[in-house]
Amino acid sequence: MIEKIKILGFSEASLTMILDILESNKHYPNIEVINNINHTPNKEYKNVNFNISIKEIIEFESFDNLIIGVTQIKNKIKLLNTFSTLPKKNFITLISKNTDISTTTKIGHGCVINGMVCIAGQSVLGDFISVNRNSSIGHHTKIGNNTTINPGVNIAGDRKSTRLN
């Protein structure tokens, strides 16, 4: 059971997606969000089931559970460059329990996979992939690092995305 998560970067859409996934899995950790991209919230994101604190600076420990809190690729890359000294192993992957993912799918570090997603066999997802609701990834598909798959996207089987950074 995850007791605490530190989220790097802040957007209401990403935070809402992360909370939905945690809630679907009945995990209610304390959450610290580092808002180093100077985002001013203008949409609701709070959920009474979670203790959320938003900070400008967070101290990191070697055992921290980390997740990227933005989905725009340019913001992901900016955050990953800013926090490049943090070990990749600390970035957890969150997967909604309302997904259908083949046991032969390989998923990298720091991915966020929302509900109603289907990922077929022999697919490979790199690191820091965001897969939004109601998306489908076909068999033998390779998705490169830092990619965001928007809601409702269907990627046919045997495809390759080349985004690496």
Image: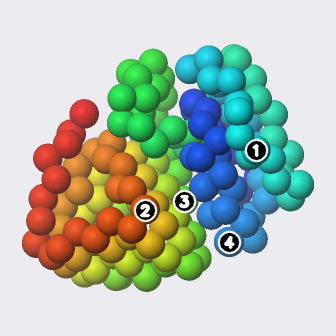
Q: Amino acid at mark 3?
A: Leu
Amino acid type indicated by mark 1: Glu
From this viewpoint, which residue is outermost toward the front? 42
Q: Which mark is residue 25?
A: 4
Image mark for residue 5: none
Q: Which mark is residue 151?
A: 2
Q: How is the image coloured?
A: rainbow
Q: Which residue is mark 1?
A: 44
Q: Is there a contact, CB below 8 Å, between mark 2 and mark 3?
A: no
Q: Amino acid at mark 4?
A: Asn
Q: Earlier in the sequence, mark 3 or mark 4?
A: 4
Which mark is nearer the camera, 2 or 3?
2
Q: Amino acid at mark 2?
A: Pro
Q: Position of residue 82 (x, y in %)?
A: 45, 18
Question: What residue is disc 3 on?
Answer: 94
User: SS at mark 1?
Assistant: loop
